[in-house]
Amino acid sequence: MSPTKFAVKMHEKSPSAGVFNHIPPELPEPDVQILTTGGLLIPVHSSILALASPALETILDRPRKHRQKERVIPILGVPCDAVYAFVRFLYSSRCADEEMEKYGIHLLALSHVYTVPQLKQRCTKVLAEGLTTENVVDVLQLARLCDAPDLHLKCIKLVADKFKAVEKTEGWKFLQRHDPRLELEILQFMDEAESRKKRRKRQKEEQSLYLQLNEAMDCLVHICTEGCTDVGPYDMEVSKRRAPCNKYSTCKGLQLLFRHLAACDSRANGSRCLRCRRMWQLLRLHASICDHPDPCKVPLCSQFKLRMQQGKKRDDAKWRLLVRKVVSAKAISSLSLPKRMRDDVAISPRLT
């Protein structure tokens, strides 16, 4: 029986689609055979194998110890139909969806061993889409062995997200017994992921605080230059002061601090209460970021600027960091505005 007839006969017996469906009729008869599990032989063309797989090309170029008439390449350890699907992909660059779903793990291993990147990429994508808590550990181990970093990362993320369900599976129990290094890697990833989550939450809270301080600085200027409800510049008539602004919740708090600062009795005793100190810090913060030419209408702004210029009050590192963070928050908040409004906002205040 000729190799081609044998291949057709094997195709009829196999539930998979034929290996040679896409072979051009002008090709010569197969000159190599692939040995599969169970002793089955698949006749193939060495030129096709060498073109599709650098690893197979290397195998075919090896000198043979015995000059036997037919060359045989063993591909063992995987189902015969998976080898059929692999060879078919080498010939046609195609693989049926049902084969990919059924033999995706085997095809990933074959594509890695025999260096077929196009098939490896498709296997990685299909396996990533079909991950479950039951198979994720098996796929993770294979992705690690087959150098598939994207699939490896997706598997670890799924394990971390569904760890309570995954640790009950047989795959996880097998991993604990036979691969403690991978188990440690997964646990370290989970610990780092939790740390990143806490860090992002903390950074988000800090950014929210800086945005609130930036809004307070805007409201401070707004109150002292334009007025808001019944609090405004000393030289502006009460009847001309504006209605509540769109940031009135912040303005209202500042107005209460202004009233308290004007009427607080603690200054007479040479001390400041908590609310007075808070207002004093807001005024100092404004002076640190204020780039308006003198005279600035915000109380004590000019005095704070003068003291900073004379070096009488050296800011510590924490205060300078606070000023930089508030300025950054101002820049970020201005970038979120429409371009017309952004052009009216000063985003480069003077730092001291």
Image (cartoon, helix red, strand yellow):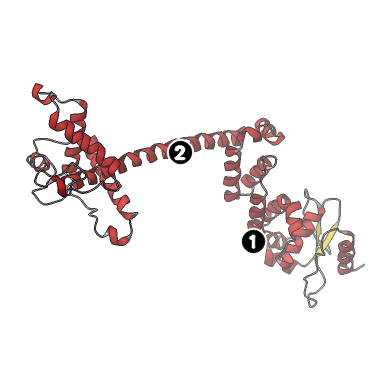
Amino acid marked by disc 2: Arg
Residue on which disc 1 sits: 118
Residue at disc 1, secondary structure = helix
Amino acid marked by disc 1: Gln
At 7% across and 42% down in the image, what residue appears?
A: 306
At 25% across and 41% down in the image, what residue appears?
A: 251
Give the percent coordinates (x, y) of residue 65. Answer: 77, 57
43 relative position to 195: left or right: right
- Res 253 visible: yes
**Image height of 145 relative to 173, above or below:** below
Residue 143 or residue 343, whichever sits in front:
343
Where does the C terminus fall, quadrant-wise?
Answer: top left
Residue on which disc 2 sits: 196
106 relative position to 6: left or right: left
Give the percent coordinates (x, y) of residue 211. Answer: 31, 43
Residue 43: image quadrant is bottom right
Q: Rate crowding at label 1 as few (under 14), some (14 to 19) or many (20 or more) other CA atoms within 10 Å.
A: some
272 relative position to 117: left or right: left
Question: Mark 2 vs mark 1: which is more N-terminal?
Answer: 1
The Cα atoms of the two marked residues, 2 and 1, are separated by 34 Å
